[in-house]
Image (spheres, helix red, strand yellow):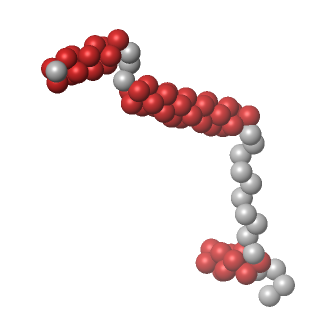
Amino acid sequence: MSSEGSAGKAAAEAKGLNPGLIVLLVVGGLLVTFLIANYVMYMYAQKTLPPKKKKPISKKKLKREKLKQGVPVPGE
């Protein structure tokens, strides 16, 4: 009787896809779609957005840089 039960189980598994496999395929497909969409948006942004502006340098740092180069700082 137990052999008939396992044979029925094998027939049921052969007839339909494993639910775990279906979940794995759906999650994997969503992940791949997400990654591809991110890459496409990144490439689009690289082409269309202007380059980032540099942070403004403080007057202290500007003076320090000019002193390093040996350029006299105006006003001193």
**Residue 11 position within the rendered picture, expressed as x and y whole percent measured from the top left:** 28, 13
Q: Quadrant of residue 22?
A: top left
Please determine whether, in this image, residue 19 is positioned above or below residue 58: above
**Residue 15 position within the rendered picture, expressed as x and y whole percent measured from the top left:** 35, 11
Residue placed most toward the observer, 58 or 41:
41
Q: Residue at x 71, y 58 (%)?
A: 54
**Residue 58 position within the rendered picture, expressed as x and y whole percent measured from the top left:** 75, 75
Q: Quadrant of the C terminus?
A: bottom right
Q: Residue at x 31, y 18 (%)?
A: 13
- The answer to whether residue 14 shows anywhere in this view is yes
Q: Residue at x 73, y 81 (%)?
A: 60
Residue furthest to the right? 75
Residue placed most toward the observer, 26 or 16:
16
Number of numbered discs overlaid on the protein picture: 0
**Residue 12 position within the rendered picture, expressed as x and y whole percent measured from the top left:** 32, 16
Compared across the picture, whether 10 is left or right of 38 comes to left
Residue placed most toward the observer, 74 or 62:
62
Residue furthest to the front? 1
Compared across the picture, whether 49 is left or right of 23 comes to right
Residue placed most toward the observer, 67 or 47:
47
Please determine whether, in this image, residue 70 is positioned above or below residue 13: below
Please determine whether, in this image, residue 60 is positioned above or below residue 56: below
Q: Quadrant of the N terminus?
A: top left
- The answer to whether residue 10 shows anywhere in this view is no
Compared across the picture, whether 64 is left or right of 4 comes to right
Q: Residue at x 23, y 21 (%)?
A: 5
